[in-house]
Image: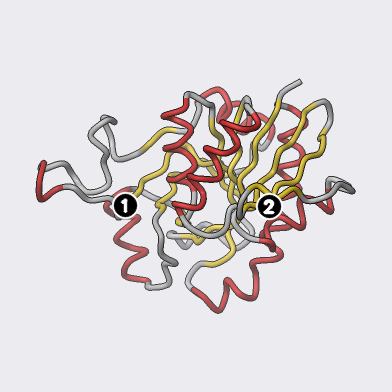
Amino acid sequence: MKTIGMVVAMEKELLPLLANAGYEGEEVKEGYFSVHIFRIGENKIVCVKSGVGEIFAAAATQMLVDRYAVDVVLNYGVCGSLTEDLGVKGLVVVKGVVHYDFDTSPIDGCEVGRYLEFPSVVLPTDEALLAKAKSILPGAREAICASADKFVADDGEKRRLHEVYGADVCEMESAGVLLTCLHAGVPCLVLKAVSDGKGGADEFKEMVEEAAEECAKVVIGISSAL
């Protein structure tokens, strides 16, 4: 049995998971965070609704590590597509994350997006968890995720993120989650479903719930197999 910590940003992403898991428990408050504890198969799930953005996500992840001693952390939810071949509701298993608005270059000459502690701008998710997820979801896209505290709606910025970093999707939490896990020595897996592409914010508003539902079903299957 493992204790799996889950970090999800929004209520619209959380509710499909609870519904599909048959959750009947009560919400626990940890400061400003909402925590739900239940089981999927033999595994204990501690799911925290962090709120939107990297800082909230990092703080929620550290709380899972410190207070619940989780064995692994799974960050799931919706994302934007940076390429036209990845359609809405398409699933991605994230192999690496770029925190693309991190920039210390004026003082150390380090390339934009790279932390000096790491050899690459692409921060790796856990290889064993990635392989496990790919074996369970052979049709899911393996992707690099561009992550920062901004909703990317501009087509030019989407092209730039894809061309500069090789990123396939973008969102606002995974860099905070992954960096915290790497520093804490806790394996991290990131799963996302596309909620918007060229349609930007309007498409997100229309499709976020369907994409979240798709992702939640996959998360349940993977969580029972970890």
Q: Position of residue 143 (x, y in %)?
A: 47, 44
**Residue to which mark 2 is pinned:** 34
Identity of the residue furthest to the front in this view: 31
Q: Secondary structure at mark 1?
A: loop
* Mark 2 vs 1, N-terminal side: 2
Residue ID at (31%, 52%)? 100
The one of 65 and 188 positioned closer to us in this rendering: 65
Kind of residue at badge 2: Ser
**Residue to which mark 1 is pinned:** 100
Decide if residue 193 is in sight here: no
Number of other residues with Cα within 10 Å of mark 1, as a class: few under 14, some 14 to 19, many 20 or more: many
The one of 26 and 88 positioned closer to us in this rendering: 26
What quarter of the picture does the C terminus occupy?
top right
Kind of residue at badge 1: Tyr
Image height of 19 relative to 1, above or below: below
Q: Position of residue 98 (x, y in %)?
A: 36, 46
Image height of 32 relative to 207, above or below: above
Q: Position of residue 152 (x, y in %)?
A: 41, 67
Q: Marks 2/1: CA distance?
A: 28 Å
Residue ID at (22%, 51%)? 103
Hey, which quadrant is residue 210 in on the image?
Answer: bottom right
Hey, which quadrant is residue 111 in on the image?
Answer: top left
Colour scheme in the image? secondary structure
Residue ID at (32%, 66%)? 157
Image height of 220 relative to 55, above or below: above
